Amino acid sequence: MTFEETDIEIRHTICAICNPHTHCGIDAHVKNGVIIKVEGTKENARSGGTLCSKGAASRQYIYNQERIRSPLMRKGKKGSGEFEQISWNKALDIIADRLNSIKQDSGPESVAFYAGFSKWMRPFLKRLSYSFGSPNYCTESSVCFTATQIAGMLNFGYFGKPQLDKAKCLLVWSNNPFYTNTASVRKLLDARERGLKIIEVGPLLTPLTNCADIHLRMRPGTSGALAMGMAHVIIGEGIYDQDFVGNWTHGFDAYQKYAAQFTPEKTEEITQVPKERIIAAARLFAQTKPAAIMSGASPTVHHTNGVQNHRAILALLGLTGNFDCEGSNYVMPPAWLHAANGMKTRQTAYEQSRPLSEMAPPISAEKYTVWNQLIGEAQAMELPYRIQNANPYPIQAVVGFGMNYRMWPGSDALKKSLQQLGFMVNVDLFMTDTCRLADLVLPACTSFERSELKVYNEDYIIWTAPVIAPLWESRSDTDIIFDLARRIAPGDDLMQQGYEANVDWILEPSGFTVAGLKPFPVGCRITNIEKPPYQKYKSTGFPTPSGKMEFASTILEEAGMDALPVYREPKYSPVSTPELASEFPLILTTGARLPMYVHSRTFRLPWTKRLHPNPTLDIHPVNAAQRGIFQGDRVTLITPRNSFEVDANLTEIVPPGTVNIYHGYTDPEINVLFEPDYLDPISGFPGFKSALCDVRKAPHSRRDEW
Ligand SMILES: Nc1nc2c(c(=O)[nH]1)N[C@H]1C(S)=C(S)[C@@H](COP(=O)(O)OP(=O)(O)OC[C@H]3O[C@@H](n4cnc5c(=O)[nH]c(N)nc54)[C@H](O)[C@@H]3O)O[C@H]1N2
Ligand SMILES: Nc1nc2c(c(=O)[nH]1)N[C@H]1C(S)=C(S)[C@@H](COP(=O)(O)OP(=O)(O)OC[C@H]3O[C@@H](n4cnc5c(=O)[nH]c(N)nc54)[C@H](O)[C@@H]3O)O[C@H]1N2
Ligand SMILES: [Mo]
């Protein structure tokens, strides 16, 4: 049927509910300005017409009753949730007056700009922060991905993605793409059919476990020991790449000596992985060329020993010479946000409107020196402390875009700090508990109501057009940022020119322009990219201080830390704190992803909620039986810091001795279980995936309906 007959127009956009490199193409069926149905865009090079349960529920996200409808100003006490509606102009003027006066009285560094899980507005927000004069631009990446990036930078200077279509062996170290990166699974399964060998590492059973040739089920937090154990076998059996190690690495002798300690027996004792499996995995990985490593953005680094663990994992690539060659981890410079396909842009130059050296040190500069050296943003785990601490300067205002205080370990501590904060703004789609702490709340719109630049690794680019006008008085984050720029960064000429002119500036080296992309709402193939050569180090060396791949990191050594990827137990573990472990004998891992939820986002959608209605704690039947716990029983989950009640789910997905709970719920709020300083000293990343706990049957333990 035609548009004339039905009044229904199909418009193209993307679903931006989950992480950026997975955003699926959407065909929105629009009638009289309302989206009546969504389908996947077949032409989209990434998603090819598929949608998951979250994308399929998009209408419940867009038309949700909890959407914020207009700018709001606090009327009652902080946190009371009493607000009055005000106009956009008034809201922006109030914010600008307050930020400008803080800047005058205390310096621009007293204002922190923060972006939550959404990435699309970040380059613009960062530039706003720098043009205003504050080095305290920080993001959710303070708990996600950056620590793995730091490990890659310390070892190699840069890092690359596994080339799935060319690899013959894939070491999947804690990644569950079936739930977390659905659009990539087809490629993985195709590669598997072609004969790709898969080694999976991780304590949980996942859908990938069924496709893996070997599964190494380690105790949470012991990845570093396991990787050193594999190195022990590879070196001992002489199956490492002697040419690469001899010519292109730094610190091999010390690494070899250190690896000698990790005999299969000792590694089994630490990690609980049977030694035969460690030996088999090490041989398969070292002897199947080319091989690559695919790791999740965060499960290997949500540990108090995370960076060193991840360095030990990545060192296996150097040891076997599988770096930046065909079918291994191939290095591609970043193009836009997290996409890297060889397309050239000026994102980094755009963000650095002012050099950091011209500003005060960021809040985390002193505590996280290596982070400060390598990562161009502040570590947000310092926020709760620096809001309260005036030395050397306090944070007096936070301007958040999608800020969720529940993301922090010891979330109640950040909440308390935010309640004491002088001035807070939060921009969100929904009226969240974090918004309730703010002085001003601004309504953002969804990806369906805005224009954004989307670049995919599959040599594909889209400039989306809004498929409906922003609902109520909501606006796109970038409109808000550029309106603020006019008020608080008037000296930044480029920012005065507005969103599209700024995107054009960023895109300049690519040959694309916004006007040139607009006629192609489904997206375009990028055909003008020159792919960088393999083994770039052979002509330029590695971008590390030694110019080599570093088994022993010169940067860590200078910072007074272990130069080798030394394995230290998690801060709380049966080995490091046996006394504590006698009271809290189970290991707590949190936040393994569920397919229908993305952090706090999709709980409010009836379709996704129905797929997993209640928060549950995964516990092995053996541990449940020891405690007299049955399926569905109410139990108390207790850590040295806090406790709450939740329903038990008896499952062998978790190994005996480990329990798992998802992280996005408001009730129970799981991050109250962690101390705010339960952090990796190198990256500041929280130990979300290896702590100690116990589970006890709650006093009235049977669920009512039973
Ligand atoms: N215990 C435990 N805690 C964890 C984790 C764990 O594994 N265990 N995982 C950590 C990790 S890896 C991550 S990435 C974080 C998640 O980090 P969070 O930032 O907490 O993620 P979300 O809840 O998805 O998003 C925050 C807010 O952004 C809003 N939002 C959505 N879209 C937009 C938009 O377009 N514009 C604006 N302005 N706002 C928008 C949402 O409504 C939501 O309120 O959680 C971390 N916390
Ligand atoms: N549906 C959905 N997709 C998402 C998200 C979401 O919330 N929902 N979040 C997005 C974000 S921000 C992120 S960071 C990614 C995460 O994406 P993934 O890394 O793929 O997902 P996870 O479920 O965190 O991790 C799964 C793997 O980690 C292993 N694991 C669990 N505990 C530990 C541990 O203690 N140590 C080690 N080494 N491994 C462990 C498990 O055995 C499993 O193999 O997902 C992204 N995609
Ligand atoms: Mo994440």
Image (tube, rainbow, N blue to C red):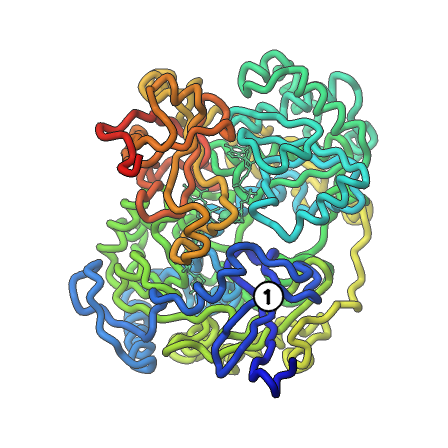
**Residue sitting at 74 percent across and 47 percent down?**
330
Report the side of 672 relative to 12 (left or right): left
Q: Amino acid at mark 1?
A: Glu
Vertically, is 629 above or below 665? above
Q: Local crowd at mark 1 within 10 Å, few (<14), some, or many (≥20)?
A: some
Q: Secondary structure at mark 1?
A: strand
Tell me the quarter of the image containing the N terminus: bottom right
Tell me the quarter of the image containing the C terminus: top left
Residue wearing tag 1? 39
Vertically, is 546 above or below 286? below
Report the side of 134 relative to 193 (left or right): left
Query: Outermost residue, top direction?
Result: 265
Residue 439, percent across and down? 25, 66
The residue nearer to you, when weighing 530 against 158, is 530
Residue 501 lies in what quarter of the image? bottom right
Residue 411, percent across and down? 32, 45
Query: Outermost residue, bottom direction?
Result: 4
Residue 237 lies in what quarter of the image? top right
Residue 360 lies in what quarter of the image? bottom left
